[in-house]
Amino acid sequence: MGCAGFTCSKHSLCALNILYVMVSLLMIAMAAWGKWLGLVSSFQVVGGVTGVGVFLFFVALAGLLGAVKHHQVLLFFYMIILFMVFIVQLALSSACLAINKEQQDHLLEVGWNNSHGAQRDVEKSLNCCGFRHVDLNATCHAACFPKRSCLPCADKIQAHADEVLRLVGGTGLFFSLTEIVGVWLTYRFRNQKDPRANPSAFL
């Protein structure tokens, strides 16, 4: 029974961390793909997504190595980091789902004003100019600008923002649940005795 429980915990923890490795590589690949195709020109956005992907990759790698080798120190730090990520992600996911229309509008405008790279991306992808007003004397990267037929971007962004926030919040909640399962699995696995180890060895 002990051997079966140990093996089950080990395989479950390995499978969970392989999933995290795949998600991290997907995030890095999507950021690189978006930058290469010119879909995202903002260095902050690409750097942020890539940074989160790299962080998740190393955390998952530590968890995977700890599970394979039943390494007490790696498993301990992995458990602590994963629990901290769980708390932050749960808070952010809840905020995404609970944000109201006025807060959403304010955050969108602040984000628009603070990122010129994101402005270019939005103007090109949504074919609009400016946030609330179209300034014909300013530079705009939308296809409609030479024809002077552009509309402000605020309404178009807001039409998608609620859906995106719900998607991000729901996805974040799902992954936060897998993270707390990972913490529990790590705690359980770390306290189990490896049946293949020397019974007299100190764990």
Image: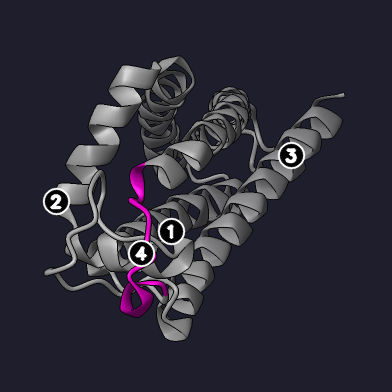
Q: Residue 88 at what x, y percent from top left?
A: 35, 27
Image position of 134 (left or right of 65)? left
Helix, strand or loop at label 4? It is helix
* Label 3 – label 2 distance at C-alpha: 43 Å
Residue at the farthest front position:
148
Vertical placement of residue 169 versus 94, above or below: below
The residue type indicated by label 4 comes to: Glu
Q: Distance between the Cα atoms at labels 3 and 4?
A: 45 Å
Taking the spot 32% from the left edge, 70% from the top edge, the residue there is 148
Gap between marks 2 and 4 measured at Cα:
15 Å
Identify the residue position indicated by label 1 in the image: 53
Question: Counting residues from the N terminus, which is met first, the one under dot 2 or under dot 4?
Answer: 2
| Front position among marks 1 and 3 | 1
With respect to residue 30, does 17 lie above or below? above
Q: For residue 76: magenta?
A: no
Tag 3 near tag 4, CB within 8 Å: no
Q: Amino acid at mark 3?
A: Ser
Name the residue at 37% across, 54% down. Answer: 151
Q: Amino acid at mark 2?
A: Asn
Query: Which mark is nearer the camera, 2 or 4?
Result: 4
Q: Which mark is residue 114?
A: 2
Alpha carbon separation for disc pair 1 and 4 = 27 Å
Residue 53 image offset from top left, x and y in percent: 43, 58
- In the rendered structure, which amino acid carries the disc numbered 1? Gly
Q: Residue at x 45, y 46 (%)?
A: 156
Magenta-tinted stretch = 144-154
Q: Nearer the viewer, mark 3 or mark 4?
A: 4
Name the residue located 52 percent from the left edge and 59 percent from the top edge.
Answer: 24
User: Can you tell which mark lies on residue 30?
Assistant: none
Q: Position of residue 59 (x, y in %)?
A: 43, 50
